[in-house]
């Protein structure tokens, strides 16, 4: 049990998992629980399912510290979530998130749910873009890294990677790239996956496959991806690439396309670039950025707890954390 | 039963279907059977399965006309087929296909199987490309359309679309685009499909969605696809596009990328462009080509029987068909 008294329960509640954090007055994590059900895997449907999952994860904390405020971010606030918290528009910061938050009643608690963020279409063929959960990670990154509080570019790799522009602590624009989901569906459900063994490749083979995928991506012009993807089959069929390396080749090809588009505008000198997320995936992106000659990125881990604490403070549920210091992720 | 005496049984045997054609001396189809099992759906595995499927489709023809020669093209000649017929390299024509053909013994017949074609890597980041089955369709297109016998560009849309350069009746190079398979796996297995109703859209809505997908594809630079795909979600989530139109939007986006890459080199004036394949899909591609300002293509239907007849003639199994005339597909 924690030494300091907790002041907040913070929930990072996405499609596939629920992580709960018991937090102290300095914004520190006193205890955490991982592996609760995501919103697509609730024990029962509807509000009862959300309440049951919440109580299973946090009931003991609330029993010991009754009346703790609770905040939540992620897909729990989507149309398929506990209660929908409609998107706020760019530019967005913790203030606008807090003003548009919605609350639900749970056994022994009131839970304040953060909205997602919408980027309006720009240009004739522009389309809107949306995020839900990443805005909390971005707020955490801003809390932990003062270097990002001017102009900054953040990349949050994953199923739906986000490339985000920050200006003076606000989200001013972003683009989603379906890189992770493309990799998953192509590996599991397309003809490309049939040539790929389940076991991971030896490191040298994996690195060579990844690098070749990056190079092929970089060599292509507009529209090249549907053609280049077939290389993950033809290189295997012809024996030009060992089958063990094909999955890493596909990964490099897809991440390479994401980087081509994301870096198209360039990163102005002096504007820091940050990678936020799971360490292994961030290292993979850092290697790809280096191969593309991009500036070396800051590497941040899981910034969601710090972001949820900031959201609670912006909503007046806790006092702001001690003036931020540069904290290693 | 046919009036003329048959001289050949021709099999178009792919992954998902077996089509058998009973053909006369002029290269005409006297009778045909559709719906036999593709090589991934045989009644039993291995050579016995191939033989059983062949006998079920063609046994009655062979009983009435014993000793008819039999030819086959498509995935039946792949490593997962009845017997592997290794790829021949570009430039390839019916002569090189016939020289590299392999034979299998079936009940009451000897079956000559056509090889596929390999295009070697070109350039520093070039990768090899392969086709198997399309070379037969191309041979049929050349037999039916003398206009293609100089320089020509052929597009064979499908699961794995092929863009092929022909010179003097030979396949000199080609590129595969995984457009159809991308559409299928994204619709069936990705988050994008969840917003798409099963029922087809009303024609005007479908056309508008398709056109917007084409325009978005055309507006993008290198690497744009993983980002642009997310528009099929964000346009639906925000209500900017009716959900009924999203599948056609995705189709337009993917076909647009294929066209961007395929047309990148341009089609020289006077070089005919042809679409070969299923009529509905060819009309969709013709509409996309028009939107991209490409020359109007010739539209050819199923040219596989004519190609298989030409393959049999090149192998000396039948006399060449009467000097080719311009025959409507």
Image (cartoon, coloured by chain):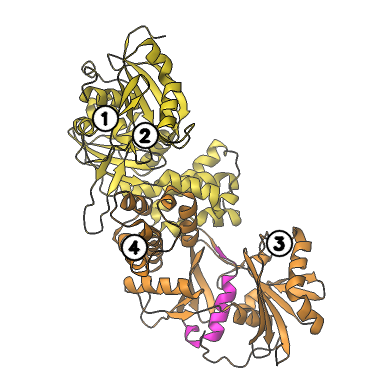
Chain colours: A orange, B yellow
Name the secondary structure under disc 3.
loop
Q: Between marks 3 and 4, how big is the CA–CA gap?
A: 38 Å
Residue name at image x 41 percent, y 55 percent: A196
Q: Chain of mark 4?
A: A
Labels 2 and 4 in the same subunit: no
Q: Is residue A325 magenta?
A: no
Crowdedness near tag 3: few (<14), some (14–19) or many (≥20) residues, C-alpha within 10 Å: many
Name the secondary structure under disc 2.
loop
Q: Quadrant of the N terminus of chain A?
A: bottom right
Name the secondary structure under disc 4.
helix
Q: Say whether marks 2 and 3 touch (CB < 8 Å).
A: no
Labels 4 and 1 in the same subunit: no
Q: Chain of mark 1?
A: B
Residue named by callout 3: A42
Front: mark 2 or 3 = 2
Residue named by callout 2: B82
Q: Provide the residue span drawn in magenta.
A: A130-150
Of residues B289 and B39, the one drawn nearer to the viewer in this rendering: B39
Q: Say whether marks 4 and 1 touch (CB < 8 Å).
A: no
Of residues B28 and B259, the one drawn nearer to the viewer in this rendering: B28
Find the residue positioned furthest to the top: B3
Residue named by callout 4: A209
Residue B208 location, x and y as percent? 50, 43
Q: Between marks 2 and 3, how big is the CA–CA gap?
A: 48 Å
Left or right, residue B242 beside residue B281: right
Q: Quadrant of residue A119?
A: bottom right
Q: Chain of mark 3?
A: A
Which mark sits nearer the N-terminus, 3 or 4? 3
Q: Chain of mark 2?
A: B
Name the secondary structure under disc 1.
helix
């Amino acid at each position: 049990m924690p030494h300091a008294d907790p002041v907040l329960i913070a929930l990072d509640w996405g499609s596939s998992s629920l992580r709960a954090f018991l937090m102290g007055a300095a914004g520190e994590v006193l205890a955490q629980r991982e592996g609760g059900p995501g919103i697509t895997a609730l024990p029962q449907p509807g509000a009862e399912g959300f309440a049951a999952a919440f109580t299973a994860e946090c009931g003991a904390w609330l029993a010991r510290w009754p009346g703790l405020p609770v905040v939540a971010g992620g897909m729990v606030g989507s149309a398929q979530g506990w209660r929908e918290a409609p998107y706020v528009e760019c530019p967005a910061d913790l203030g606008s998130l807090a003003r548009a938050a919605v609350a639900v009643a749970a056994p022994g608690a009131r839970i304040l749910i953060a909205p997602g963020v919408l980027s309006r279409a720009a240009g004739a063929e522009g389309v809107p873009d949306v995020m839900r959960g990443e805005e909390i990670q971005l707020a955490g990154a801003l809390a932990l890294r003062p270097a990002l509080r001017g102009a900054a570019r953040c990349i949050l790799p994953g199923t739906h990677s986000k490339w985000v522009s920050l200006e003076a602590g606000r989200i001013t624009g972003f683009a989603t790239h379906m890189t992770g989901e493309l990799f998953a569906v192509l590996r599991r459900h397309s003809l490309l996956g049939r040539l790929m063994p389940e076991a991971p490749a030896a490191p040298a083979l994996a690195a060579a496959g990844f690098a070749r995928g990056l190079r092929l991506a970089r060599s292509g012009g507009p529209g090249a991806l549907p053609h280049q993807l077939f290389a993950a089959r033809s290189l295997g069929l012809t024996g030009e690439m060992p089958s063990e390396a094909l999955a890493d080749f596909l990964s490099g090809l897809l991440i390479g396309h994401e980087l081509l588009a994301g870096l198209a505008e360039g990163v102005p000198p002096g504007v820091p670039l940050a990678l936020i997320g799971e360490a292994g995936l961030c290292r993979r992106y850092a290697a790809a950025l280096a191969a593309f000659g991009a500036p070396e990125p800051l590497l941040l881990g899981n910034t969601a707890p710090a972001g949820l604490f900031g959201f609670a403070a912006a909503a007046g549920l806790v006092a702001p954390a001690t003036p931020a210091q540069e904290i290693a992720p």
